Image (tube, helix red, strand yellow):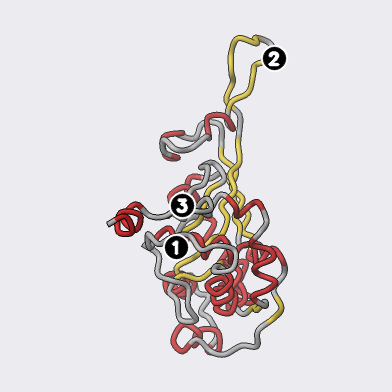
């Protein structure tokens, strides 16, 4: 299970890792894209999926593109890739087959792509992999692993706030807590932003949390845990 995101967290959002890496982003992208360190993310081929280890899937890709600023990794897979590695929840079969125009009763395999989003990397493992590859971090960046540092906070973009809101719902799910409503989610989302060097007001986070992309993460109005409902009926 992933630990909560904090200033000294072992697991960092890709964007925060990129900020610490600075000129070593290219070398890190190769290590991350090849699945050489632990990586956690949500997957575009799994509907309403939780964050999960994806380094094995990255290692199987024909090519990857690591986007630090968007917390995303795009991966392209060869048509001969073993589909079983994606698991039973994946819709990869729909992505990787196309009608054969010469014989419409048959499907033919094609190369396909997946997107991994809200990506987190294991920071100590990444630091170690870079050092093993002859690309050690300079002292200021490496010290963030130990004492966290206090870099100035920057104003978060709407997309970064949406990513933080999604991460807050992920944390609630992983800890088996009731999903926060649009007002309650502001506090954990703000903490996640600040842990990655950004900030936004709670009012702004609340307004963006009302976006329908987050609606499916919340319980319907009036729903309670079964145990809570039983307790009130006694």
Q: Name the quarter where the N terminus is drawn.
A: bottom left
Looking at the image, which residue is at 60% across and 73% down? 24
Q: How many marks?
A: 3
- Residue 5: x and y in percent read 47, 73
Q: Position of residue 147 (x, y in %)?
A: 46, 89
Q: Earlier in the sequence, mark 2 or mark 1?
A: 2
Percent of width and height locating residue 181: 55, 62
Give the labeled residue for mark 2: 101
Query: Mark 3 and mark 2: span between their CA atoms?
Result: 49 Å
Quarter containing the C terminus = bottom left
Disc on the earlier residue, 3 or 2: 2
Label 1 crowd (10 A; few <14 / some 14-19 / many >=20): some
Q: Residue at x 42, y 55 (%)?
A: 224
Residue 16, percent from left and from top: 58, 73
Q: Residue at x 52, y 50 (%)?
A: 220
Q: Pointer 1: what residue? A: 172
Which of the two marks, 3 or 2, is nearer to us in this view?
3
**Front in this rendered view, residue 150 or 135:** 150
Q: Which residue is mark 3?
A: 223
Sequence-wise first label, 1 or 3: 1
Relative to 221, residue 60 above or below? above
Q: Secondary structure at mark 3?
A: loop
Residue neighbourhood size for the residue with mark 2, other residues' Cα within 10 Å, grouped as few (<14), some (14–19), many (≥20): few
């Amino acid at each position: 299970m992933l630990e909560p995101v904090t200033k000294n967290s072992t697991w960092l959002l890709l964007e925060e890792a990129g900020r610490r890496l600075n000129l070593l982003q290219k070398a890190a992208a190769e290590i991350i894209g090849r699945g050489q360190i632990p990586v956690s993310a949500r997957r575009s081929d799994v509907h309403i999926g939780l964050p999960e280890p994806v380094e094995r899937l990255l290692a199987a890709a024909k090519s990857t593109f690591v986007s630090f600023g968007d917390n995303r990794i795009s991966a392209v897979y060869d048509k001969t890739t073993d589909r079983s590695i994606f698991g039973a929840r994946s819709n990869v079969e729909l992505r990787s087959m196309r009608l054969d125009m010469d014989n419409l009763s048959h499907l033919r395999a094609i190369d396909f792509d997946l997107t991994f989003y809200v990506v987190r990397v294991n920071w100590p493992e990444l630091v170690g992999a870079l050092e093993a590859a002859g690309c050690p971090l300079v002292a200021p960046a490496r010290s963030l692993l130990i004492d966290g540092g206090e870099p100035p906070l920057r104003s978060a973009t709407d997309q970064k706030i949406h990513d933080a809101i999604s991460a807050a719902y992920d944390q609630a799910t992983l800890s088996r807590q009731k999903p926060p409503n649009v007002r309650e989610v502001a506090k954990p989302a703000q903490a996640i932003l600040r842990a990655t060097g950004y900030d936004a007001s709670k009012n702004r986070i609340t307004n963006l949390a009302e976006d329908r992309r987050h609606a499916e993460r919340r319980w319907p109005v009036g729903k309670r845990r079964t145990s809570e409902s039983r307790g009130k009926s006694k």
